[in-house]
């Protein structure tokens, strides 16, 4: 019986030390916690833009956009690099809709070399690349405007390659 009493007393003593060592009340006084209670300062007017950017895309007719990047071999090569970074995983290495990630989509990503896609205007393609469609994410937040136009030049070059074959 005395062994149980010693074990009970020891356990109680250890529990008391651990319990009293955890002073949770001090956490509320911690500077790193209280810093978030400070009110946000008033924002001066005119600091946040309310025009331009992606909002222009949403309210403009896609047919009004024209590709500002001239169609050159250099722009096609740069567009191919951007396509490899941002589009290849879904649309595939030949832009035919057979990318590794795109295989899990239903419906599959479109064949970007097809007549159905190639007859679309550059502005319409820019609109879709920028704002996304179905499973395609909007790339306007990720990809610079110039790079989106370069991708369109690359896609146009693929159609020309098919025509020459």
Image: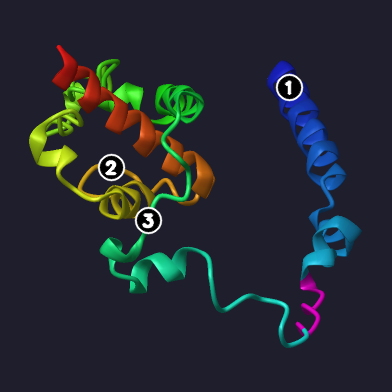
State the image coordinates of residue 111 (x, y, percent, origin top left): 15, 29
Q: Which element type, helix, strand or loop, lies under badge 2?
A: loop
Q: Which residues are magenta?
A: 37-43
Tell me the crowding category of disc 2: few under 14, some 14 to 19, or many 20 or more residues within 10 angstroms, Cα based.
some
Q: Can you identify the residue that label 3 sits on?
A: 66
Give the residue pinned by disc 2.
136
Q: Residues within 10 Å of mark 1 (few under 14, many from 20)?
A: few
Dot 1 or dot 3: first in sequence order is 1
Left or right side of 116 for 17: right
**In front of the other: 17 or 72:** 72
Q: Which residue is mark 1?
A: 7
Is residue 61 one of those drawn in magenta?
A: no
Above or below 110: residue 145? below
Q: Is residue 83 left or right of residue 118?
A: right
Inspect this view and state whether residue 142 appears. Answer: no
Pick the front one: 105 or 147: 147
Q: CA distance from mark 2 to mark 3?
A: 22 Å
Image vertical order of residue 151 relative to residue 92, above or below? below
Is label 1 in a helix, a strand or a loop? helix
Residue lying at 71% horizontally and 84% vertically, measured from the top left: 46
Secondary-structure class at tag 3: loop
Left or right: 153 in relation to 162: right
State the residue at coordinates (17%, 38%).
118
- Residue 119 x, y percent position in the rendering: 14, 44
Q: Nearer the viewer, mark 1 or mark 3?
A: 3
Residue 84 vertical position relative to residue 19 in the rendered view, above or below: above
Q: Predominant secondary structure in magenta? A: loop
């Amino acid at each position: 019986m005395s062994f149980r009493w010693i074990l009970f007393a020891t356990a109680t003593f250890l529990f008391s030390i651990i319990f009293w060592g955890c002073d949770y009340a001090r956490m509320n006084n911690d500077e790193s916690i209280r810093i978030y209670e400070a009110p946000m300062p008033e924002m001066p007017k005119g600091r946040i833009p309310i025009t331009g950017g992606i909002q222009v895309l949403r309210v403009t007719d896609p047919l009004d956009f024209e590709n500002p990047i001239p169609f050159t071999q250099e722009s096609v090569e740069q567009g191919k690099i951007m396509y490899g970074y941002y589009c290849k995983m879904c649309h595939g290495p030949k832009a035919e809709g057979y990318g590794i990630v795109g295989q899990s989509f239903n419906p599959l990503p479109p064949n970007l070399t097809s007549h159905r896609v190639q007859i679309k205007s550059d502005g319409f393609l820019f609109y879709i690349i920028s704002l996304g469609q179905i499973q395609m994410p909007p790339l306007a937040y990720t990809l610079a405007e110039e790079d989106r136009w370069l991708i369109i030049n690359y896609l146009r070059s693929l159609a020309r390659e098919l025509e020459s074959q």
